[in-house]
Image (cartoon, rainbow, N blue to C red):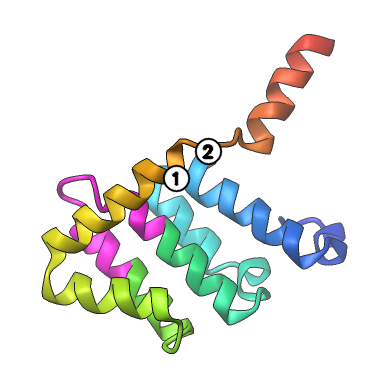
């Protein structure tokens, strides 16, 4: 991420990198996720992509008790970056009004999505290195 070559990576690959990094590799590591959200490479993404990544990261915490402040903080930041995005609006406003129902909706979406889970490229690299090493 801090490599000068990172700037030359296509936008779609940067997005995929940040998604895997934030949602898979830094899962449950809020301070590290916040550091990424504040980094120049992350803030170099288009606002809509930043908002989506923040929203998806926040959604990971919805099913964890005691993480409401993290969820609200990430969702608020997502909404500030893309206040016109329909999904961001839905999650942000419903989270404020009916948090338990929002949690249920997001959990249902996550269960449906898990059926098509993919392995993080970082995990693939580790497995590949072990096999060749």
Q: Is residue 133 visible?
A: no
**Residue 26 colored in magenta in the image:** no
Give residue 122's position: percent from left, percent from top: 66, 35
Q: Please state if 121 lies on the left or on the right of 81 as rendered.
A: right
Quadrant containing the C terminus is: top right
Give residue 115's position: percent from left, percent from top: 46, 35
What's the residue at 87%, 58% (across, down)?
Answer: 5
The kind of secondary structure element at disc 2 is loop
What's the residue at 62%, 37% (across, down)?
Answer: 120
What's the residue at 61%, 74% (across, down)?
Answer: 43
The kind of secondary structure element at disc 1 is helix
What's the residue at 58%, 47% (across, down)?
Answer: 21
Q: Please state if 34 lies on the left or on the right of 131 as rendered.
A: left
Give residue 98's position: percent from left, percent from top: 12, 70
Do callouts 2 and 1 mark residues in contact (Cβ within 8 Å)?
yes
Q: Which residues are magenta?
A: 57-73
**Residue 58 colored in magenta in the image:** yes
Q: Quadrant of residue 11?
A: bottom right
Q: Which disc number belongs to residue 116?
A: 2
Q: Is residue 4 above or below residue 119?
A: below
Q: Is residue 99 above or below residue 81?
A: above
Mark 1 — residue? 113
Give residue 53's position: percent from left, percent from top: 51, 63
- Label 1 neighbour load within 10 Å: few <14, some 14-19, many 20+: few
Q: Is residue 37 visible?
A: yes
Residue toward you, 64 or 85: 85
């Amino acid at each position: 991420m801090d490599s000068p070559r990172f700037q030359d990576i296509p936008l779609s690959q940067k997005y995929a990198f940040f998604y895997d990094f934030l949602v898979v590799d830094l899962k449950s590591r809020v301070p590290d996720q916040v550091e990424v959200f504040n980094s120049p490479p992350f803030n170099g993404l288009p606002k809509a992509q930043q908002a989506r990544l923040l929203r998806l990261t926040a959604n990971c915490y919805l099913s964890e008790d005691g993480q409401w402040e993290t969820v609200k903080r990430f969702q608020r930041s997502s909404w500030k970056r893309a206040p016109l995005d329909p999904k961001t609006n839905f999650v942000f406003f419903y989270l404020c009004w009916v948090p338990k129902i929002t949690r249920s909706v997001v959990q249902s979406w996550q269960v449906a999505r898990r059926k098509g889970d993919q392995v993080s490229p970082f995990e693939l690299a580790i497995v590949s290195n072990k096999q060749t090493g």
